[in-house]
Each structure stands twice: as structure tokens, then as C-alpha cells.
Amino acid sequence: MIIIDNIREENLNQALKKLKKKWQDSKAVEELRDRKYFTKPSAKKRVQKEKAVRKQLRTAKTQLEFLNLKKIPKKFIGL
């Protein structure tokens, strides 16, 4: 349950903004979307692996750009 303190002292818009931020940070929306349909455990694992690969490629690409390499090897781009 999400609780916001000092609602009477703040503007209503500020209180709503805090509520929305806490709601997003709690990841309740993602959990509701995930529970809407059943996904097999193997499908969940596959999606997690794909996300991890994309994240590694993204970080490798940014690291190479940070080192000012003008030509990025294709294996790091994912082609």
C-alpha cells in the first residue's frame, strides 16, 4: 500500500505527482501487466536472457564510444 505524508500541507497536484512516482517505483503496474496473461517459465527465462544480451550490447557500445573509437566492431553492435 502506498502512503503519502503531509497531504494537507502540499498542493493537490504535488501530492498526485508523488503518488504517481511511488506507484511507478513500486512496479505494481508491471506486475499487473505480467499477471494479465499466463506466460510459461521458459518464455520468461528467454525474455530475461534477451534483455540481458541487449543490456550488455548497449553498455559495450557506450564504453567503446567513451573510448572515442570511431569504428565500432560489428560484433559489439549485434549485427
Image (tube, rainbow, N blue to C red):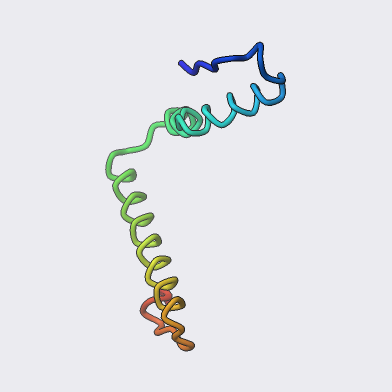
Residue drawn at x 36%, y 50% is: 47
Q: Image height check: is 4 above or below 29?
A: above
Rendered location of residue 68, percent (x, y): 46, 83
Count up the numbered dots. Answer: 0
- Which residue is situated farthest in the top direction here? 8
Rendered location of residue 78, percent (x, y): 41, 73
Judge by depth and name the residue closer to the eye, 19 or 75.
19
Residue drawn at x 42%, y 73% is: 61
Determine the image quadrant of residue 27: top left
Quadrant placement of the N terminus: top left
Determine the image quadrant of residue 52: bottom left
Q: Image height check: is 8 above or below 30?
A: above
Q: Image height check: is 57 above or below 24?
A: below
Rendered location of residue 54, percent (x, y): 40, 62
Judge by depth and name the residue closer to the eye, 12 or 45.
12
Quadrant placement of the C terminus: bottom left
